[in-house]
Image (cartoon, rainbow, N blue to C red):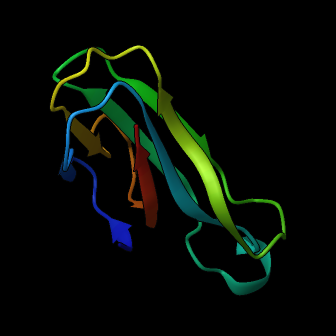
Amino acid sequence: MSLLPPNYEILINSPSEGTAIWVYFVLSGNAQKTGAYTTTAANFSMDGGAKSSFLHDGSKPVGFLYNQLVYARTDMVNASHRLLISVSDRPASSWVNFDYAIYM
């Protein structure tokens, strides 16, 4: 993943049935030194439900942050699920770097 324009969507279908999911991104900082765009802003919607938002402004000079939990849901019924990750409703582009997800 990389810099995504506004209104971009990523759809993740769970590979198996489960009752919980944890989603991790790589986040970035250090925009002041490099001038790179490092804001991560994303919305998460499970099975078409209400959106949950995540924002990391990237202003602190920290470099890359790996294994960063950006979304968790542990109250799902035991079934197949669809997770929609979007940068809709955002005024500008967003740097999104999907790392991994854990299904249980």
Name the residue rendered at 52%, 53% in the picture. 24
Vertical placement of residue 103 versus 3, above or below: above
* Whole-percent x, y for residue 17 in the image: 21, 34
Q: Is residue 88 left or right of residue 11?
A: right
* Whole-percent x, y for residue 67 in the image: 63, 61
Vertical placement of residue 34 versus 10, above or below: below
* Whole-percent x, y for residue 51 in the image: 34, 22
Does residue 96 appear anywhere in the picture? no
Q: Quadrant of residue 19?
A: top left
Q: What is the quadrant of the C terminus in the image?
A: top left
Does residue 32 appear anywhere in the picture? yes
Q: How many marks?
A: 0
Query: Looking at this view, is 27 or 32 the one in front?
Result: 27
Vertical placement of residue 101 versus 2, above or below: above
The outermost residue toward the bottom is 34
Q: What is the quadrant of the N terminus in the image?
A: bottom left
* Whole-percent x, y for residue 90 in the image: 37, 40
Name the residue rendered at 83%, 70% in the picture. 62
Name the residue rendered at 21%, 53% in the picture. 10
The outermost residue toward the right is 61
Q: Is residue 97 left or right of residue 61?
A: left
